[in-house]
Image: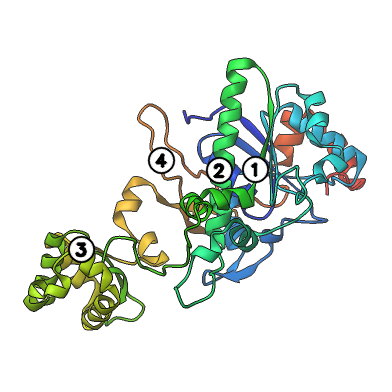
Amino acid sequence: MKPLAGLRIADFTVHAAGPFCTHMLSQLGAECIKVESALRPDIFRKPHTVYGRLGPATFDQVASNKLSVRLNLKHPEGIALAKRLVGVSDVAAESFRAGVMARLGLGYEALRAVKADIVMVSISSCGQTGPDSHFAGYAPLFGAWGGVGTLTGYRDGPPVEMRHVMDHSVGLNAALATLAALHRRRRTGQGAHVDVAAREVASSLVGEALLAAAAGIAVGRMGNEDHWRAPHGLYRSREEDRWISLSVGGDAEWRALARVMGRPDLAADPRYASQPSRHAAREALDGLLAGWCATQGAEAAVEALQAAGVSAHVSWTARDIVGDPHLRRRGAVVEVAECDGGTRAAVGAPARFSRSANPSIERGTPGLGEHEAYVFGELLGLSTAEQRRLIDDAVIH
């Protein structure tokens, strides 16, 4: 049995950050029921060319394992059904702009009236309170506003836009907060409203920069440099789009690198004799490494460097990851069956448990409204005739 088996989530989240939160919880065993509507489907359900395929790639990732029902939340009976769903759930998750759920009649107080110990998770750009709470936002905004973007990029270049890594960081933080609220509920019997602000998640990732700035220390972009290690960076190999990631710390690693490069003169050069001197000369070293790596096959060079004790690896592409036998053996990359009869690779949760079933993806992307017979019929007890009436009245729509 999985760790979260028996928990149920009424999932009102959209786009990526919120759905990634509930996706992670679903892999841990929670039953996740995604509430959608044909009137306004999740924008990521629409086909869009991304990652080299035509289809809802982002939606496929964050909707796997979930059940899908349609509900028209602009209809009073749709709101009533949503409340009934919350009444048989442990968590209600949403990722609308602050105040939207309350205006729909589905705010925390309204849901508490339905289920006193409900854990409601609200994920938004700037949080549910404060002068900026009315702002909407997407991943690039979270990273820019939270300070991640301005620290990312080369010294002589502009800030770099942060996309899915920001959505996923927000989702992971929200999943952690959800589990904390559920643990508290188990101890006290009390529910909670969890308020997750995406821009604050971004700022939490750059804490050392904030401390430095508060102390009056200038903080800027570093590219692939390191505060201490040199050479340190990504270097193009002779192969198309195959890059070598390399990092040298102590003197022994430096001498080993020089041997692999066939350059004993570098190890003897007083300009590079110590770690501080190498760091001071890091631009010159980058030029030397770039010239050598450009003549090498990536895999062969990395194998030689690792054998010599130098920290190095090929910078992997998505294709490398999907085909990696180690990840396949651990179930970190799995084949998922789709409702159209096809299969696709999917990335699982990066955790394993010794005394329970491991996180996994049992089903692919749900069709819109695919699980209404189970949710409305079995869970909520609606007859087939009543479900047909609600469909005719555009409540289930």
Q: Is residue 354 above or below residue 254?
A: above
Q: Which residue is labeled 1 in the image? A: 196
> Residue 27's x, y, as percent?
51, 40
What residue type is disc 3 on?
Gln
Q: Is residue 379 above or below residue 276?
A: above
Which residue occupies the foreground of this view, 155 or 348?
Answer: 155
Q: Which of the 4 image quadrants contains residue 49?
A: bottom right
| Mark found first going from the N terminus, 2 or 1 | 2
Can you tell which of label 1 and label 3 is closer to the viewer?
Answer: 3
> Residue 316's x, y, as percent?
35, 65
Crowd tier of the residue under label 4, counting other residues whose Cα lies within 10 Å: few below 14, some 14–19, many 20 or above: few
What residue type is disc 1 on?
Val
| Mark found first going from the N terminus, 3 or 4 | 3
What numbered label is drawn on residue 174? none
Q: Which residue is labeled 2 in the image? A: 173
Q: Which residue is labeled 3 in the image? A: 275
**Mark 1 secondary-structure assignment:** strand
Q: Are marks 2 and 1 in contact (CB under 8 Å)?
A: yes
What numbered label is drawn on residue 351? 4
Can you tell which of label 4 and label 1 is closer to the viewer?
Answer: 1
| Mark found first going from the N terminus, 4 or 1 | 1
Instruction: Report how far apart the C-alphas of labels 3 and 4 lie in the structure.
Output: 36 Å
